[in-house]
Amino acid sequence: MEEKSMKKSFSSLGFRFLIGTLVIYAVQMGVMAIVGAVKPEWLQDTTISLILAVLPLYLVGMPVLIAVVKRMPGEAPAKKSITPGQFVLALIMCFALMYCGNLVGTLITTVVGALKGSAVDNALMTYATGSNMIVTFLYMVICAPILEEYIFRKLIVDRTVRYGQGVAVVLSGLMFGLFHGNLNQFAYAFLLGMFLAFLYVKTGELKVTIGLHMCINFMGAVVSVLLLKAIHLEEYQEVIMNGADSQAVMDYMMKYLPGWIGYMIYVLFILAVLVTGIVLFIVYRKKLKLEPGQIAKGRRFKTVIGNPGMICYCIFWIAMIIIQMFPEIVTAITGNL
């Protein structure tokens, strides 16, 4: 297949995802604007704000994105079942990638925050810790994994795997990471997205990646949040900020001892999973191979990313990430209008 034809296909995919993205933003902003004009107090409630952001996304935005992308021809990878043991190993490897990526993202945003003199806002954590847990569970553990895996694994991989398994895997991870729209999540979403795409390429089973995604989000958005609430993190931060002595800190920890015990067990679990996951990647590194595709080595970036559609998609999301990190820029610009 000629390079020009392949670039045209990737450009079409990029533009289709961009159209879906713009529809999502337009619907969400429209709903927020209407609610802000009619019931502004609702926007002060974290749970209601989350619902107002999620409903337009899942009822209008993502269905439009899916409909637009599905018009492109695609072919699913051959199906191959995996054992429960293989699923557990894959889950451990997913956790390792998530924690490594999260560490990288946290370090970068910490440095950015230090340079600009204020912390980079983490909207997802704000929603997760401030929203009703049932709403959080339904959104992050049930809805998000199903739709995100369908969109960023099935829709993308089915339409790009014929150009090479590696191309499909990297593109799936990149578009998935950018779609999160913030640097806090990009690093781990990119790594995790590539690994989930790898599993989908090798198994052809979307239910495998959905199951893994659900487990990951459950630990990150439910278990971790419940533990943070159990140790009353805000009170701990207040104790530290007030320059309390060691006795005051000890009194605080004894006050919430069960929560701290659970939290320490969770930290040990993270360390164990992180080390085990890294070991598994080393042990199975020779099996993590992908079949070469039609795009010549040295031409892949130019063919896959260096086209109008993908460039526009990437520019849009990079701009969103910059705005998320430096909201004061937007405030300054709008204030001068």
Image (tube, grey):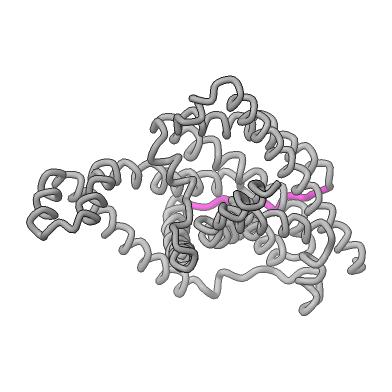
Q: Is residue 76 magenta?
A: yes
Vertical position of residue 295 compared to residue 91: above or below: below
Residue at the farthest front position: 336
Q: Residue at x 24, y 55 (%)?
A: 241
Residue 183 % position (x, y): 54, 59
Can you give x and y, in whole percent of width and height, for residue 55 in the image? 59, 29
The front one of 77 and 118 is 118
Q: Along the horizontal axis of the image, is 107 left or right of 164?
A: left
Q: Which residues are magenta?
A: 73-83
Relative to residue 29, is residue 298 depicted above or below?
A: below
Residue 103: x percent and y percent? 42, 64
Q: Main secondary structure of the magenta part?
A: loop
Q: Is residue 182 visible?
A: no
Query: Does 279 lie within the magenta span?
Result: no
Q: Where the N terminus falls, by quadrant?
A: bottom right
Q: Residue at x 57, y 52 (%)?
A: 327
Report the label total.
Answer: 0
Residue 254 in sight in this render: yes
Say which quarter of the image contains residue 107.
Answer: bottom left
Would you say 162 lies left or right of 335 here? Answer: right
